[in-house]
Structures are given as structure tokens and as C-alpha cells.
Amino acid sequence: MFLAHLQTSKKRVNGKVVHYEAVCGFDFRVLTQELVNALKKARFKRIRLAWDGSYRDQYKIKDAIKMFLKAGYSPKDLMLFMIVNWRIPKEECEKKLDLMKVWNVKVCDCCYDGGYRYAVPEYWTEEEIREFRAKCRKHNQLVNFGVDPEINRLKTFA
């Protein structure tokens, strides 16, 4: 029933096409190619996948990314959520971030306790939280621009 609704979703408002966005990450464990294709057909954009678990899930996450690419999404349409300040250590989240660089996929680092503004260091230190957030911002700049936009261009001399 859900897939049938997605596949027939052609909603327009004032003659304009409606696009959808799921702000929470899709759970890779329930994704099928049929469902991902239906999301694309129903005009879902800015796809977020949840990678809340271990680095060992990398193959399953990569398979989910492949499903979205096969459905017609580009890597720039995809983002991965990672829980920060949680039971997954910072070092493991950094390894996930390294893989996302290889995959050219953005990260939505997500502080599990309700956001960074009010983050209470529980599993990570305050410094670890700040440092990892800065790494995620830099990672996304590199994915979005292909270069580090904060570095000034140096004049080259021939």
C-alpha cells in the first residue's frame, strides 16, 4: 500500500511540482531497491541515511548508497547521519567520515541528546564534540565544492 501511494504521488500546488524530503535518516535495514525507486519516482530529494551503528556496517551502508544511485540519485543528493556524543566512539565516527570522503557523500552529524547548542558531554568530551563537528563541516565543504573554499587562491608564477 505504501509503495503504491509513493509511486502515484504526483502532487502539484498552484501548478508547481511538489518535492518531498524526509528529515530523519532512512534505516538501511529496511530499504529495498523497489522502495528506493518509489522514493525517487515520488520526488523525494536530499536523501538522508542513518548510520547510527558500528563501522562494521560499512558494507550495508555502501549497498544502500548503491540502491539510491541505481534509482537515479547522485552522490550529492545523499547524506549520512552519524550520532555524535553517543556510544560509538569518536575514533570510529572519524573512520566513518573517512569512508564518506571516498564515497563523496556528505555527513549530517547528529548530536543524540537534542542538538549541539545544548549538548551535554555524556559519552564524548565537549572538546571531542566541537572537534568532530568542525571536521564534518570541513568534510561537507570539500564534497560540495571539490576544494577547500576557506583557502585563498595563491598566485602562481610561470
Image (cartoon, helix red, strand yellow):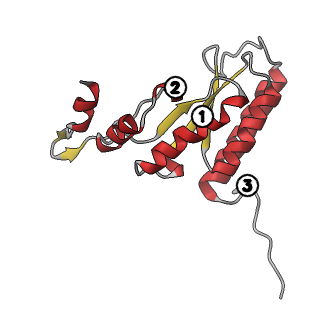
Reading the image, the residue beneath label 3 is 150
> Residue 71, percent across and down?
40, 48
Residue 145, placed above or below residue 89: below
Amino acid marked by disc 1: Lys
Label 3 SS: loop
Mark 1 near mark 2, Cβ–Cβ under 8 Å? yes
Query: Which quadrant holds residue 62?
Result: top right
Pick the residue in front: 119 or 140: 140
Amino acid marked by disc 2: Arg
Reading the image, the residue beneath label 1 is 60
Q: Give the spatial CA distance, label 1 vs label 2.
A: 8 Å
Residue in view at x 60 percent, y 15 percent? 114
Mark 3 near mark 2, Cβ–Cβ under 8 Å? no
Horizontal relation, residue 11 to residue 113: left or right: left
Q: Dot 3, crowdedness within 10 Å: few (<14), some or many (≥20)? A: few
Image quadrant holding the N terminus, namely: top left
Q: Dot 2, crowdedness within 10 Å: few (<14), some or many (≥20)? A: few
> Residue 56, percent across and down?
71, 30
Amino acid marked by disc 3: Glu
Image quadrant holding the C terminus, namely: bottom right
Q: Earlier in the sequence, mark 1 or mark 2?
A: 2
Q: Earlier in the sequence, mark 3 or mark 1?
A: 1
Residue 158, placed above or below residue 77: below
Residue in view at x 80 percent, y 32 percent? 131
Reading the image, the residue beneath label 2 is 29
Question: Nearer the observer, disc 3 or disc 2?
Answer: 2
Pick the residue in front: 30 or 48: 30
